Amino acid sequence: MATALVTGASRGFGAHLCHALKAAGHRVLGAGLASSPRHGDLDEYRVVDLRDSAPLDPFPDENVDVLINNAGVYLDDPRRGCGDLFDLSLDDLRETFEVNLFGAVRMAVAYAPRMIGRASGRIVCVSSGMGRLQDADGASFAYRSSKLAVNSLVLTVARHFADSRGDLSAFSYCPGWIRTEMGTEAAPLDPGPAADDLVRLLELPPADSNGRFFRGIHELGWDIKGPFVSGRQEAESRTSRSWR
Ligand SMILES: NC(=O)c1ccc[n+]([C@@H]2O[C@H](COP(=O)([O-])OP(=O)(O)OC[C@H]3O[C@@H](n4cnc5c(N)ncnc54)[C@H](OP(=O)(O)O)[C@@H]3O)[C@@H](O)[C@H]2O)c1
């Protein structure tokens, strides 16, 4: 039985991931802020605040086969009236990176070397299409740039995995816009199927998953060639080009 560790396990997408992993026969470990998880799909749970700077190793005695960095915050969500760069507080930017990036890095640094040592493992970062440069729309700088950096973390771990022997894979996963506290009730997608898809992707051989970015069961891909910015400046430049 493979052991999976999920951050942000008590609610939202993380809770659905725990359910899908349990149904697929995993032993499921969870970590998060809540004093206790809100569901019964966990074998073990530890309270962990990813904003803490202490070394992060919630399950030092466990052989973690699958690490899913799922915990995340979206503090500059325009739906909360605070998506503009010029209104962004440094505290919110810092907290976004502490949870979304530093937390994921510290977990990866704790568990990836052990996976390399055992020549087996999966590391998944729950990212977002919003972390692709091509999807930047001028809002939510903190969230977008934290997910862009997480994607870079995945590629870095994937490179280490590719240079090692064994059944090792690291990939990014976007669940799509799902109904959770972060996604809100307005989201079109149910988190359950998105969690099932991620668990299915764990079965892919490294050649088909390592260093890739998925949305649902399909590969989303990284960024394409720019320019990614359009608007008045580009329209003016187009006009001046055609004018010449
Ligand atoms: N919802 C969407 O539409 C959507 C779309 C694309 C990507 N995502 C990504 O999917 C992941 C899960 O999001 P969600 O929609 O499930 O969000 P959510 O409902 O707001 O849940 C966020 C989770 O993160 C945990 N968390 C937050 N701050 C933490 C901290 N300081 N230390 C430890 N855990 C912390 C929370 O733990 P507690 O429960 O213990 O408080 C909670 O379990 C995130 O990475 C998010 O960026 C979501």
Image (spheres, rainbow, N blue to C red):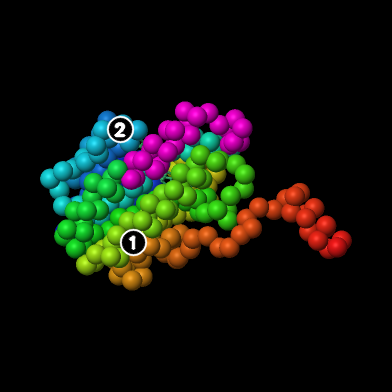
Q: Which residues are magenta?
A: 81-105
The answer to whether residue 60 of the structure is visible from this angle is yes
The answer to whether residue 15 of the structure is visible from this angle is no
Left or right: 169 as drawn, with respect to 227: left
Whether the magenta-drawn stretch holds residue 205 is answered as: no
Q: What residue is rendered at 48% in x and 31% in y?
A: 92
Foreground of the two, 37 or 207: 207
Which residue lies under the disc numbered 2?
A: 53
Q: What residue is rendered at 81% in x and 61% in y?
A: 241
Main SS category, magenta section: helix
Foreground of the two, 193 or 204: 204
Q: What residue is rendered at 16% in x and 43% in y?
A: 60
Give residue 243's position: percent from left, percent from top: 87, 61
Q: Secondary structure at mark 2?
A: loop
Whether the magenta-drawn stretch holds residue 103 is answered as: yes
**166 lies above or below 186:** below
Residue 165 position by quadrant:
bottom left
**122 lies above or below 136:** below
Q: What residue is rendered at 39% in x and 43% in y?
A: 101
| Label 1 – label 2 distance at C-alpha | 26 Å
Give residue 139's position: percent from left, percent from top: 60, 42
